[in-house]
Amino acid sequence: MRVQGGLGGADMAERLNVLAIVQAGRLQYEAVLMAASLRRASGDKLRLILAEPQPGPLWQHDPRINDPELRALLIELGAEIRPFESRHFGQSYPHGNKIEGLGVLEPGQPFVFFDTDTLFLDDLTQVPFDFSRPSASMRREGTWPVIELYGPGYTETWKSLYDRFGLDFESSLDLSQPDEYWERYLYFNAGWFFGADPREFGRLFTEYALAIRDDPPEALICQPLDPWLDQVALPLVIHALGGGRPGPELDGLDGDITCHWRVLPLLYARESDRVVALLEEISAPNRIKKVIKRYEPIKRMIYQGRGHKVRALFDRDNLPRREQKIRNLIKKNKLWMR
């Protein structure tokens, strides 16, 4: 397998694999911020591997990084860029990159996947991962399934999936939550997840996602699967591999160690002063600034001060409970960008 870049120093085989997806457009600029923050927080203790989809019949345009200077900067920041072929998803479902991209990792080596819209606030090696018990992010809302009047409820919908793949449904439930309330059912944000073997994780992820997409159980016939397909399949994969909801030992993820910021207006609206300060610190060096300011939302939000105008609209101690209300207020003030 062709590998680009990478840090010297510690034995590469002994360092944890941190995986993300990189491609032309927004993700390549986010990847610079991610790599810069990881390097600042953890030095060369980790391997940052960026999986890059290659051109092929499932892509209308070349999905690879389209800026040679940006590619060189990622390598300078310690990233290894590894190619993969899109065989099942591609342009029609780019979220599938995180499923197929797992194939760039060596089998049997523990991994943690992060979306590129992640900042590392502190050293990831502090997190006591138990790779024999995979898990994923709980920073999510009840976005799926969409319950319709007279249609299947949460139990019927989720149970149909567990039954399809021969998994025990009852053991996946959080019995402290009421029946037919979305948090009773195993549901993650796919912004981060981890496991012991990327090949086995990827095999199951692919198998389940394709079966749900191509031959869904009857209870899912009217359910939207774009963009939710990865988040529908992910809990099934984690449950099948003996994992479940993250315990308190993982509170640093989506906490003091990592921040999944999603889009820059949301970062400025709701994240802590510490996150904003880190973002502006790592984006300040000229070698980084001259590359990432080519992306208009970064240029306007970070370097032209629009982000702080967004920030002034909100009280971080009294934010709207629903993300959509935050988005709507930003859009009302004509400050939304992504």
Image (cartoon, rainbow, N blue to C red):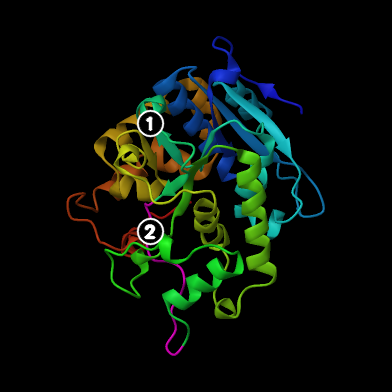
Q: Is residue 69 left or right of residue 127?
A: right
Which label was assigned to residue 77? none
Q: For the magenta stretch, what is the residue range?
A: 138-150
Image coordinates of residue 313 in percent, x first then y, are: 24, 53
Query: Which residue is rendered at x = 46% and y = 22% of the image?
Result: 39
- Residue 126 against residue 272 in the figure, above or below: above
Query: Which residue is rendered at x = 49% and y = 39% of the image?
Result: 132
Image coordinates of residue 73 in percent, x first then y, are: 59, 23
241 and 277: which is toward the camera: 241
Can residue 86 be seen here? The reply is yes
Which residue is denoted by mark 1 in the rendering? 128
Mark 1, secondary structure of its residue: loop
- Check residue 78 for magenta coloring: no
Query: Which residue is rendered at x = 56% and y = 57% of the image?
Result: 230
Mark 2, secondary structure of its residue: loop
> Along the polypeptide, which appears first: circle 1 or circle 2?
1
Image coordinates of residue 122 in percent, x first then y, are: 35, 27
From the image, state whether disc 1 or disc 2 is nearer to you: 1
Residue 212 in which image quadrant: bottom right
Q: Amino acid at mark 2?
A: Lys
- Residue 214 against residue 219 in the figure, above or below: above
- Check residue 143 for magenta coloring: yes
For the image, the number of numbered tags is 2
Residue 107 in which image quadrant: top right
35 and 82: which is toward the camera: 82
Q: Is residue 43 left or right of residue 227?
A: left
Which residue is denoted by mark 2 in the rendering? 334
Can residue 304 be seen here? The reply is no
Q: Amino acid at mark 1?
A: Pro
Q: Is residue 76 left or right of residue 320?
A: right
